[in-house]
Amino acid sequence: MLLIKNGRVLDPATKLDTMANVLIVKDKIVKIGSPREVGAKALELQRENGEEIREILADGLVVAPGFVDVHVHFRDPGLTYKEDIHTGSQAAAAGGYTTVICMANTKPPVDSVDVLRDLRMRAMDLPIHVLNAANVTVAMQGQKLTDMDALYEAGACGFTDDGVPISDERLMREALKKAKKLDVPISVHEEDPLLMNSPGVNYGDVSKQLGLGGAPAVAETVLVARDCLLNQDIDAKLDIQHISAGMTVDILRFMKKKGVNVYGEVTPQHLYATEQLVMKQGSLARVNPPLRTEADRQALIDGVVDGTLDMIATDHAPHAKDEKSKPIEDAPSGMIGLETAFALCNTVLVKSGRMAISDLCEKMSLNPARLYGLDAGRLYEGGPADLVLLDPEEEWTVTEADFHSKSKNSPFVGEQVTGRVKYTICDGKIVWA
Ligand code: DOR
């Protein structure tokens, strides 16, 4: 039995925000309430089963549902020199995540039942819940749909070709129809290759200074608008990944008002930083879609605050040191993000006074869980004991030692941030402290 004492307990689903104790037995929350109520329950259970009571003192801490990340790259199979499902899970636990969804741009990609089955088998022994999205198109080539029915049967929780966009709109329409029939999200990477000069750095001042072609915001916005329009009558759960441009927020706001079934993901890095980070950190800040301007960043924050953007997802994208040490034009795009996600978001959204911590928890747990129909993102009696304990006031400086990922490619080492994950509990077990 695990007794969490004297924390500020938040449940974004019911808007519960109260000082309380939480009692966990095995993998379930048994009681949330006053010290007296919870203490009585613990003693009653102890009399029944003789189990010892382990206590966590949560004074000054927020007790919230474990975070749910709908967008991570664990590089397994095939690219495990960057990350594997074990190190990725460890990084996730350290970041307060109890459920993650792995993207399918592995080697081979997750476009076949064989690859997916192997991943589903191996996910059973991990300290957190690791789910898999499968590919929309064969070999992520954008030419032919995968056998989405078979992949769904084999355990795919959703579909994505993340890393590359789906250019062919007829194929996209078929994919939306299929996702609708299966009632699972389809998550899309929106960067039109025909409009890209070079990926990873925003087209603008910084790309010009560095002599790079740059990735213009319009490459994102045209595909976002197109896919929302395609989905108007199909009504699939369309998830726009890692939104970077202010105009995309405007498009989503409009489309949602029109009743289009669309969801928006934004990353901590796009909320926290701008293209200027590329000048400071070089290839470590290269990411697709790129960090953009301050006006874009402010529009993303507005979108999170007003609910246009539904979820914060890390796009945790590990790359090896020698890959990221190359000149920026040759280095792969992407950055790790699980361990710093809460601190960056808490600093930029909560500490700044833009939103309440319970609303941040909603974006990091409840909303992603709801999109995927998961029993997660909530704290309730009888519900899963997947929790995170947070110190929203702790100030700290990010160091390489804070990362548990196999890769260390964060542009935020040295950054001073506020808010720290103190404990992560998954299935009633402490998986990070
Ligand atoms: O920068 C990125 N890197 N963006 C993506 O969408 C994919 C990711 C990766 O897999 O490295």
Image (spheres, rainbow, N blue to C red):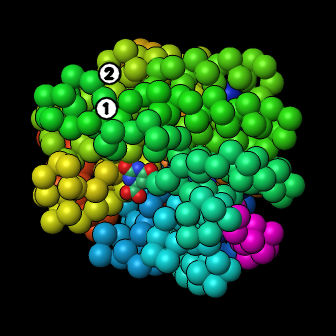
Observer-nearest of 279 and 356? 279
Looking at marks 2 and 1 on the same chain, the residue that comes earlier in the sequence is marked by 1
Query: In the rendered image of this protein, does residue 132 appear above or below residue 58?
Result: below
The residue positioned 75% from the left and 17% from the top of the image is: 257
Tell which tag, 2 or 1, sits nearer the viewer: 1
Residue at horizontal 61%, vertical 21%?
251
- Given contact means CB atoms under 8 Å apart, are the residues at marks 2 and 1 in contact? yes
The quarter holding residue 159 reads bottom right
Q: Which residues are magenta?
A: 145-157
- Going by the numbered disc 2, the residue's amino acid type is Thr
The image shows residue 225 at horizontal and vertical percentages of 63, 29
Q: Secondary structure at mark 2?
A: loop
Residue 376 lies in magenta, yes or no? no
| 68 left or right of 330 in image | right
SS at circle 1: loop
Q: CA distance from mark 2 to mark 1?
A: 8 Å
Visible residue check, residue 327: yes
Q: Which residue is mark 1?
A: 202
What x and y, as percent, mark residue 182?
Answer: 83, 58
206 left or right of 345 in image: left
Q: Amino acid at mark 1?
A: Asn
Circle 2 residue: 293
